[in-house]
Amino acid sequence: MLWEGRFKKEIDSKTNDFNSSIRFDSRMYKEDIKGSIAHSKMLAKQGIIDKEESKKIVDELNKIQEDIENNTLEINKDAEDIHTFIEGELTKRIGSAGKRLHTARSRNDQVALDIRMYLKNDIKEIIKLLKELLSTLIKKAEENLNTVMPGYTHMQRAQPITFAHHLMAYVEMILRDIERLQQTYNRTNVMPLGSCALAGTTYNLDRNYVKDLLGFSEITKNSLDGVSDRDFAIEFISNISIIMMHLSRLSEEIVLWCSWEFKFIELDDAFSTGSSIMPQKKNPDITELVRGKTGRVYGNLMGILTMMKGLPLAYNKDMQEDKEFIFDTSDTVKICITTLIPMINTMNVLKENMRKAALKGFINATDCADYLVRKGIPFRDAYKATGTLVAYAIDNDKTLDELSLDEYRKISDKFDEGIYKAIDLKTCVMKRNVIGGPAPNQVEKRINEIKKSLVDR
Ligand code: ARG
């Protein structure tokens, strides 16, 4: 036990299990060791511990890491946490020098440091995965610049777009996701060691030296805040919640697109599942799971926010709960992105079905009204005339392109042969040539901009 001296009895074993975090924090062993090495070097540099002792500590910590990694040292699940375990193991191996490591340090600033280091790595990994997802979506978009499909509002066919344009909407979301993560990275990149338990220390530490050794960009500026701030973790989970929301929306669309009702895409067999009873089934389980796991990440966000909300300064044991929220969030988003990438990469886009869907549903009605506007009719009147045409077409089971010029002219004598070109789906897409619109040249321009910015970053 760490707190020998004050106590006359060993801790009750069930209470120890309840109290301990080693089950989940042992995954931070590398960060813990790296942090201790930097701390020990700084203590020696400042003359707080001996140079030889520091060297012993550093060498043995490196050995402990090797031993954990080649499975010759098993992390003892009875230890209270990873910090206690590593310090205990060090002391077991090198005796009194090991006992000096914790000078001018508390587990409170130690754990704050470890989580920040751990999250910095994870954020980088997640950004890398998001960039891979971006490239996958962009590649699919490039293959579908001219694939006309209906765009929807209220799940009703609304106006013609292209599949590329639709996919690129997700690319925009992911670009913002990356930007948010980069901002959170900067706020995570602050070194808390030296805050100690809560009130700093009387030793003459060189905090900036530790910061440099560990590759942080700043140090925390208030010792109470240094040990009790988890904003960066909350921000992280909040950013990931937004990412999951984006992935979930995409997943929901893929579920719909795979259905017989849409049949816009078909997933590769390797990325779909069957049914144990219905031989005909091919299910988009992956996307359903991504949608489902989104709820679990939101749960982590609510969990950490609620855990933090009533805590007085500074450290409280409640905060030990932060790690499971963080790790689960990180694991979940990584596995979701990793699984989605090859699934999207291999999906078969059924262009003809998209085109057929676009032909039905009067998605060129706005273009018909715009045609009349260009002939000098006020938009509201053009809108009404087109509405009348649509009602007529529905009654006669026709599409707008199937109406004869006579039928058009019964509604307005401004119609002439040009109407057929104006309501042709290709024209409708081409003419939406505003910045941000679905016209293939606009989408292509945006793709090139993004590709260039990804290279420059
Ligand atoms: N296992 C603890 C945590 O994860 C480490 C800090 C413990 N500090 C303390 N004063 N009990 O938060």
Image (spheres, helix red, strand yellow):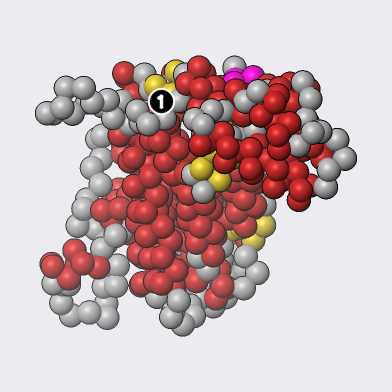
Q: Quadrant of the C terminus?
A: top right
Rendered image quadrant of residue 163: top right
Q: Position of residue 356 (x, y in %)?
A: 51, 22
Q: In this orientation, which residue lies closer to the viewer: 311 or 181? A: 181
Q: In this orientation, which residue lies closer to the viewer: 357 or 81? A: 357
Residue at image position (33%, 41%) is 289
Q: Is residue 326 left or right of residue 40?
A: left
Q: Is mark 1 within 8 Å of ligand 1?
A: no
Residue at image position (79%, 25%) is 416
Residue at image position (49%, 44%) is 155
* Range covered by the magenta-colored residues: 144-148
Q: Residue pushed farthest right?
A: 376
Q: Position of residue 380 (x, y in %)?
A: 76, 50
Q: Is residue 336 left or right of residue 122?
A: left
Q: In this orientation, which residue lies closer to the viewer: 103 or 165? A: 165
Amino acid type of disc 1?
Lys
Q: Which residue is mark 1?
A: 263
Q: Position of residue 96 (x, y in %)?
A: 36, 58
